[in-house]
Amino acid sequence: MVNLSEFGRHNNKKSKRLGRGSGSGHGQTSGKGNKGQNARAGGGVRPGFEGGQMPYSRRVPKRGFNNPLREQIAIVNFTAIENIKSDDINIDILKESGILKKSESKFKLLGSGEINRKIKIVCNKISKNAKEKIEKSGGTVRII
């Protein structure tokens, strides 16, 4: 006999068959009880509804301002770039290598880490420290 505990008991669990007669244990009202809003087809209330009481999401005070037009700028350091083989670095190469997410469209280069080769970088923003390090190693920076 096979020990089911090593495979997990829930792998073979059958779904509850509702409304298949009183002998099934889930007949007549199909486990919904008698009458009421939740017993009806399409019944129930929307998420967050508290029976007419002022919902929690509206009772809690709101603070600050969320700017819908805010631009998210990803941060990239030299420690992330040093493993890239290419000497021409731009946003597409950073996305291919997995440093940036596909959804990120702008990035700022910071000077944490060391760069010891000549690179050409195209970025949206750059720190003074990072720019100095690139120019000291003989590379070039272009800001778009």
Image (cartoon, rainbow, N blue to C red):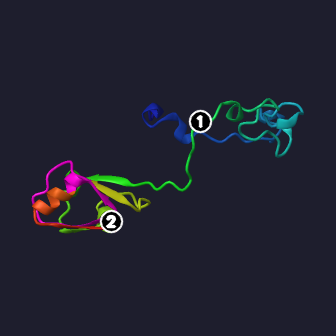
Whether residues under marks 2 and 1 lie with C-beta atoms below 8 angstroms apart, the answer is no
Residue matched to label 2 = 91
Q: Residue at x 75, y 41 (%)?
A: 46
Q: Nearer the viewer, residue 85 or 117?
A: 117
Tell me the crowding category of disc 2: few under 14, some 14 to 19, or many 20 or more residues within 10 angstroms, Cα based.
Answer: some
> SS for tag 2?
helix
Say which amino acid is labelled 1. Arg
Residue 99 percent location from the top left of the image:
31, 56
Q: Residue at x 55, y 41 (%)?
A: 12
Q: Give the residues in magenta.
A: 110-130
Residue 63 percent location from the top left of the image:
59, 35
Q: Is residue 135 visible?
A: yes
Residue matched to label 1 = 63
> SS for tag 1?
loop
Q: Nearer the viewer, residue 127 or 47?
A: 127
Looking at the rendered image, the disc whose residue lies closer to the viewer, 2 or 1, is 1
Residue 47 percent location from the top left of the image:
71, 39
Q: Residue at x 39, y 57 (%)?
A: 101
